[in-house]
Image (cartoon, rainbow, N blue to C red):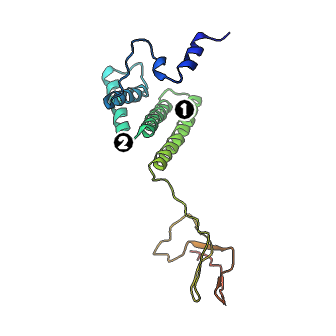
Amino acid sequence: MTDKRDKNVSKASSNPAQLLAPGVRVDASDDGIRGQRLREVADMVFHLSNASEEDMMAKIARAIELYEDLKPADGLEGMLAIQMVGTHEAATECLRRAALQNQTFEGRDLALKHAAKLMALYLKQVAALDKHRGKGQQKVTVEHVHVAPGGQAIVGNIETNGRAASPASGGSTIEQHVEVPVETGGEKATTRRRKPKLD
């Protein structure tokens, strides 16, 4: 037997206002939407049983400040910013619980593992926000290279060995992996493999 509520939800999917209780008014103004988002941010804050109302209001104010510092420009950024505040709050709560003086080893270990997962999620959320804003990592692929007679080109992958070259050592940290020979007009180009100088 199907629930009457399920039927009503499926019928109302074309008109979301039907899902609201009768007499409930939706404020679609910018202030109404902003107020709803701020309530969602406030709901992300962990409410400690022994915290005073003043402490809780300070935590909520800090969460709202974090949200506003992200400066969401559209609906997607707003939703992601709320999730980021929630992830940050959850991670810091896990770290707080791991640091409790009477915490068991197992409890501390579990709290730290959860905190690590939440912090990794937070970094993914930051990357998603940057990508949405057009600040993500960019990749350039060169498919065709034309070298004029007498010209020079490097063909292959150029990698840095994970450390910057220091001017004092004078050592190069660039390594070339040559994949294909280069032909320049009618002349044959020489390819060579440069190995980094060892310090």
Q: In what quadrant of the picture does the C terminus appear?
A: bottom right
Q: What element carries label 1?
A: helix
Q: What element carries label 2?
A: loop
Q: Quadrant of the N terminus?
A: top right
Residue 81 picture location, percent across and down: 43, 38
Looking at the image, tell me whether mark 2 or mark 1 is earlier in sequence order: 2
Q: What residue is shown at x 43% (from left), y 28% (from top)? A: 44
- The CA distance from mark 2 to mark 1 is 30 Å
Q: In this view, does 92 lie to the left or right of 11?
A: left
Q: In this view of the protein, which residue sits in the foreground, 136 or 103?
A: 136
* Residue denoted by label 2: 71
Graded by Cα atoms within 10 Å as few (under 14), some (14 to 19) or many (20 or more), the crowding at tag 1 reads many
User: Cβ–Cβ below 8 Å for labels 2 and 1?
Assistant: no
Amino acid type at mark 2: Lys
Q: In this view, does 158 lie above or below 45?
A: below
Q: Sort mark 2 into few (<14), some (14-19) or many (20+) by Cα contacts within 10 Å.
A: few
Residue nearest the viewer, comparing 105 with 125? 125
Choose top left, top right, bottom left or bottom right for residue 107: top right
Residue 153, above or below 24:
below
Q: Name the residue under label 1.
A: 111
- Front-most of 162 and 183? 183
Quarter occupied by residue 88:
top left
Q: In which quarter of the image is residue 179?
A: bottom right
Q: In this view, does 180 lie above or below 151?
A: above
The amino acid beneath tag 1 is: Ala
Residue at image point 46% right, 45% down: 129
Q: Where is residue 115? Give x, y as percent.
A: 52, 36
Q: How many labels does the image show?
A: 2
The percent coordinates of residue 147 (x first, y second) are 59, 82
**In this rendering, the label closer to the viewer, 2 or 1:** 2
Q: Which residue is depicted at the point 57% across and 85% down?
A: 148
Res. 144 mark: none
